[in-house]
Amino acid sequence: MSAVTGTMATATSPVASLAIMMRALKLPTVARHAEEVAQKAEREGWTFGQYLHHLAELEIHERRRRRTERYLKESDLLPEKTLATLTRSRLTPKVAKMLPSLCEGGFVERGDNLLAFGLPGRGKTHVVCAIGHELIQRGYRVLFTPTFALVQRLLAAKRDLRLEKELAALDAYDAVILDDIGYVQQSRDEMEVLFTFLAERYERKTVIITSNVVFSEWDRIFKDPMTTAAAIDRLVHHSVILEMTGTSVRADTAEQAKREAATTVTKTMGTKGKPTDSEGATTTVTKTTTANDRQANDEVDGEI
């Protein structure tokens, strides 16, 4: 007699036996809720099929929840850059129209690439991270990494003679997001491992790239013109391209902070009684605000 059968023989009810079997079959949610759902089924007159269906739904829902939590943890996606925090009014009409279908993940199913181009501060990283979060909710595995970090990871693997194994580990992800590829000035070794990564995923798995460098300037990334052309060809062959235009999000945020600071100064000066200079309260406030404007402008210039 097996251990499971022996345990079942001492069970006091069919529901208890069911819970034991479900644990043996690695269905912990069914085991945990079997008795509770049985009582509900009895009260409401469920059929046996309805009872099993409800337990199966609970198991599937719990597995999906745990999988989503695990995928989010391993993705390294920026937690604050989600669809909920994205200011859609800043997107061009074309990008805003494409966003819902991209979040559904059809392009990942096809192994297509997603390329987001634009000047710094145009929201490229936020958009691709938001899409990444939505893909995970739909069951896709996503990895977010700065391009330089991926390159260093691949270089270390090549040095240790385990590049093939590292590429296989990356292949487990349905989509890999390479952020800021334009900031990478590749040496020949770096260029080779990055090209190898792109070539390995070609027509099979999705690469999502953000860049502030247009294709015509990618020779400064890959150095060699032939390699540059081959890399672009592989990326563009099956791809969706997002052109991120408009003003800089960071600059606009800094400008808004500057205006709010100026407003605060104005209100504060208005509550401190009469000024002592000959020009009156309005002149005093204007001078203070102008000094703050110069300081805020310096901070914006330094930040951008």
Image (cartoon, grey):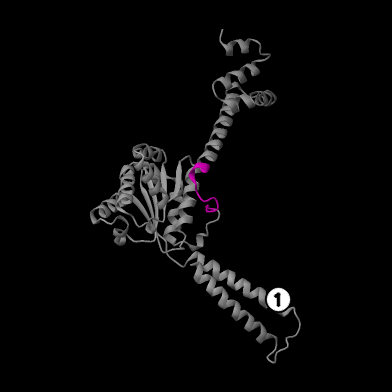
Please name the predominant secondary structure of the magenta segment in the image.
loop
Q: Position of residue 267 (x, y in %)?
A: 69, 76
Magenta span: 72-83
Q: Is 2 or 288 nearer to us in this picture? A: 288
Q: Is residue 189 above or below residue 291?
A: above
Q: Is residue 47 above or below residue 117?
A: above
* Numbered disc 1: secondary structure: helix
Q: Residue at x 73, y 88 (%)?
A: 276
Q: Position of residue 184 (x, y in %)?
A: 37, 56
Q: Residue at x 33, y 47 (%)?
A: 193
Task: Point out the residue furthest to the right here.
Answer: 273
Q: Is 20 or 213 nearer to us in this picture? A: 213
Task: Point out the residue furthest to the left here.
Answer: 226
Q: Within 10 Å of the Cα at label 1, are there few (<14), some (14-19), or many (20+) other Cα atoms?
A: few
Q: Position of residue 265 (x, y in %)?
A: 66, 76
Q: Is 251 or 9 nearer to us in this picture? A: 251
Q: Which residue is mark 1?
A: 268
Where, quadrant-wise, is the N terminus in this rendering? top right
Q: Residue 26 in magenta? A: no
